[in-house]
Amino acid sequence: MRTNWTRRLLGAMSTVVLGVGALSPVARAATTTEATAAKAPATQAATTQAPATAEDDPFYAAPAGMADAKPGTVLRSRPVQLAAFSALPQKVSAWQLLYRTTGWDGSAQAMVTTVLLPAGRPAGDKRALLSYQVAQDSSTARCAPSKVLRQGAGLEGLINQAEILLVDAAAAKGWAVSIPDYEGPNGEFGAARQPGYAALDGVRAAQNFKPLGLDGARTPVGMWGYSGGSLATGWAAEMQPSYAPELNVKGVAAGGFATDLRAALEKINGGFAAGLIPSALPGIMHAFPKTGAVVNAALNAKGKQILAKAAGKCVTENVLSNPFLNVNDMTTRPLPQILDDPQVAADLKEAGLGQRTPAAPLYIYHAINDELIPVAGADKTVAGYCARGTSVTYERDMLSEHGSLAVTGAPAALHWLQNQIEGTPAPKGCRRADVVSTLATPEALQQFGALLLADLQALAGLPIGTSRW
């Protein structure tokens, strides 16, 4: 009883902390936009009007000749005003970069990352760069971080808007941050490889963007994501040795580690967060057209209606609109039969992590009692990494649930990343520990206090990063 009560208390804490704000031609184009961006701080030049949808915004359109550019080339840039929960301006210098990357099928893609510099910190002071992957968990580019993190975006992207508080905590350490739209222009949640390419090329783009003043490929890089963001972060870790070996990745932190989409679908189905399924499933169908055909053939009229509606909405609305949804009520075949279809099974296996070996050290944190993403998937993936030589610090939290660990696990992740980036890395090898709470160490508690202070300053409209924590 006491354990259940404590988990509920931690869940309430997470709601309060994260929800407080809710009450060639290519080269010439890149040079021109970078020169323009460098003339004035982004916080002064950025527009504060509500952003256009991605479909209506020419900034997102791939320029002619884009496919001939190297991955990570900045194709276009503009200053933007970021805001917490749409309405509270964040005092950082921020830009959006359209850059060349690679899709899941190997094709050239143009994607956007949002990059920011701490306030009052001059470019070129050899700062580190954090690539932060949000838990977009939707199937439309309307919900990409480059849209929902801008001032005036509205609250449809509330869950991702809450993650700006973790970005603020990183910026308060003096780091630059890159937040890639890793699902791409088609909202391809669950795509294999593509999220990793997008995050890694977002790092390259940030390093190539002169106003950030980074030290090129020598820049110390950290990567971080939770839940759906951990899937993208895991892909970045797995693809980096072969796709971007020149990057100086010091460490990768992933929490609520989503490694097995089938296990997550089965766990979530029928539960309070079952709206995640229609939110993400259209994206999986985009990324895997043959699986999309199998699913389409199995949908009944109700299922088609639910997916059609959810495909254009962000995860917050989809979860609130579809509590306790059972996929069996949407289909003419039971969910296990659909998942056992050879094509679906093969595609979901391809979409999962653990089939490649990261080179960078990892910090993995996961709730033993996670009600959305079974801990068994993280256990298996970490064991495979360790067997193949990756250094992993793996902490399994006994008190937390999925939502609460997003908050209570963040300080330990930040502490680990800071040590990796600033020169006191964890020992090589693997360490697995079941802990009462990842928050229950002096270092994590100190980071928690610094995180809260940084976020309160950010929400109050004070400059972010003028003091280091």
Image (spheres, helix red, strand yellow):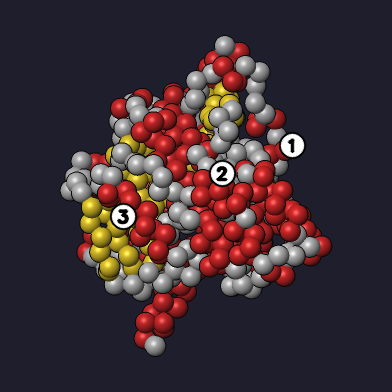
Q: Is residue 418 left or right of residue 60?
A: left
Residue at (53, 56) in percent of width and height: 261
One can see residue 225 in this view? yes
The correct choice, above or below, for 95 with respect to 66 in the image is below
- Using the numbered discs, state the Cα–Cα distance from disc 2 to disc 3 in whole angstroms: 23 Å
The residue at 32%/48% (across/down) is 385
**Mark 1 secondary-structure assignment:** helix
> Identity of the amino acid at label 2?
Ala
Amino acid found under the numbered disc labelled 3:
Ala
- Amino acid type of the residue tagged 1 in the rendering: Asp
Provide the secondary structure element on which disc 2 rests: loop
Task: State the residue in front, 151 or 137.
Answer: 137
Towards the viewer: 394 or 401: 394
Circle nearer the N terminus (1, 2): 1
**Label 3: how many Cα within 10 Å (few below 14, some 14–19, many 20+):** some
Image quadrant where residue 146 sits: top right
What residue sits right under mark 1 in the picture?
A: 56
Q: Could one spot residue 143 in this view of the protein? A: no
Q: Position of residue 448 (x, y in %)?
A: 33, 61
The label number, if any, that marks residue 383 in the structure image: 3
- From the image, state whether disc 3 or disc 1 is nearer to you: 3
Q: Residue at x 22, y 64 (%)?
A: 442
Q: Residues within 10 Å of mark 2 (few under 14, many from 20)?
A: many
Q: Residue at label 2?
A: 191
> Looking at this rendering, what residue extends furthest in the bottom direction?
1
| Residue name at image x 48 percent, y 70 percent | 371
Query: Of marks 2 and 3, which one's residue comes earlier in the chain?
Result: 2
Label 1 packing within 10 angstroms: few (<14), some (14-19), many (20+): few
